[in-house]
C-alpha cells in the first residue's frame, strides 16, 4: 500500500541534492519500501485494477459476461436434454429392431444350411454323382425340380 505524507514547502527546500552521481540519491525506490506488498495476493491486485476501467465500460463488460453465461447454461441444458431423449429413443425403438433383424438373418442362414444339407443328402442317397435316379434298365431319369423350402412370409 502507498502511504501518503504531506510535505510542506519549507521541508522540500531543505532537501539538498548535491550531485546526480551521488549514490544516496536515486529516482527509483529501494525494495525495502515494498515489503508489505508480498502479503498481497493476485486477487487483491486484480481487484485494485478495477479502478483503471471506467464504470461505464465495467458495466458493459459485466452485462456481456452475464449474457454469455446465461446463453451457455441454456445451451448446455438443451444439449443434455436432447442427448437424453435421443439415447432413450434408441434404447426403446432401435435396439429391439436391430435384435429382430439379427434373429431374422440367423434364421435365413440356418435355412440355407439346412437346404444345402438336404441337397447333399439327396445326392448321396441316389448314388449317382449327377443326382439323377436310374431306371431299371440303367438309364437316367430326369427328376422334376424340387421346390425349395421357403420360410413363411417369403
Image (cartoon, helix red, strand yellow):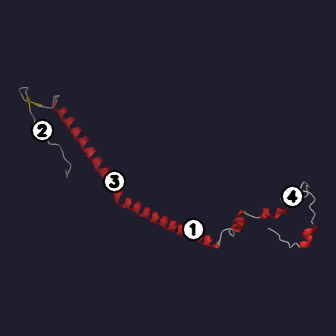
Q: Earlier in the sequence, mark 1 or mark 4?
A: 4
Q: Secondary structure at mark 3?
A: helix
Q: Earlier in the sequence, mark 4 or mark 2?
A: 4
Can you identify the residue that label 1 sits on? 65
**Numbered mark located on residue 15 in the image:** none
Q: Which mark is residue 145?
A: 2
| Front position in the image: 89 or 67 | 67
Q: CA distance from mark 3 to mark 1?
A: 47 Å
Query: Which residue is rendered at x = 21% and y = 35% of the image?
Result: 120
Of the image marks 4 and 3, the number of the one nearer the N terminus = 4
Q: Which mark is residue 26?
A: 4
Asked if marks 3 and 1 touch (Cβ < 8 Å), the reply is no
Q: What residue do we see at 81% from left, 64% from top?
A: 36
| Circle nearer the N terminus (2, 1) | 1
Q: CA distance from mark 2 to mark 1?
A: 81 Å
- Name the residue carrying label 3: 98
Residue 128 image point, x, y percent = 15, 28
Q: Residues within 10 Å of mark 2 (few under 14, many from 20)?
A: few
Q: Earlier in the sequence, mark 3 or mark 2?
A: 3
At a point 69% along the width and 65% down the height, the residue shown is 46
For the residues bearing labels 2 and 1, Cβ distance under 8 angstroms: no
Q: Nearer the viewer, residue 78 or 48?
A: 48
Q: Does residue 65 sit above or below 105 in this rendering?
A: below
**Extreme top residue here?**
138
Q: Nearer the viewer, mark 2 or mark 1?
A: 1
Amino acid at each position: 500500500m502507498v502511504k501518503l505524507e504531506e510535505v510542506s514547502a519549507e521541508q522540500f527546500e531543505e532537501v539538498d541534492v548535491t550531485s546526480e552521481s551521488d549514490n544516496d540519491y536515486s529516482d527509483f525506490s529501494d525494495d525495502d519500501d515494498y515489503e508489505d506488498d508480498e502479503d498481497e495476493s493476485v486477487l487483491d491486485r486484480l481487484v485494485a485494477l478495477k479502478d483503471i476501467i471506467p464504470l461505464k465500460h465495467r458495466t458493459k463488460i459485466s452485462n456481456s459476461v452475464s449474457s454469455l453465461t446465461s446463453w451457455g447454461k441454456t445451451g448446455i441444458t438443451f444439449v443434455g436434454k436432447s442427448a437424453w431423449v435421443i439415447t432413450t429413443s434408441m434404447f426403446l425403438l432401435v435396439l429391439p429392431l436391430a435384435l429382430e433383424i439379427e434373429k431374422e438373418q440367423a434364421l435365413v442362414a440356418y435355412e440355407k444350411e439346412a437346404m444345402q444339407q438336404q441337397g447333399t443328402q439327396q445326392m448321396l442317397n441316389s448314388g449317382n454323382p449327377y443326382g439323377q435316379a436310374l431306371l431299371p434298365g440303367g438309364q437316367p431319369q430326369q427328376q422334376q425340380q424340387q421346390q425349395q423350402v421357403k420360410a413363411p412370409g417369403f
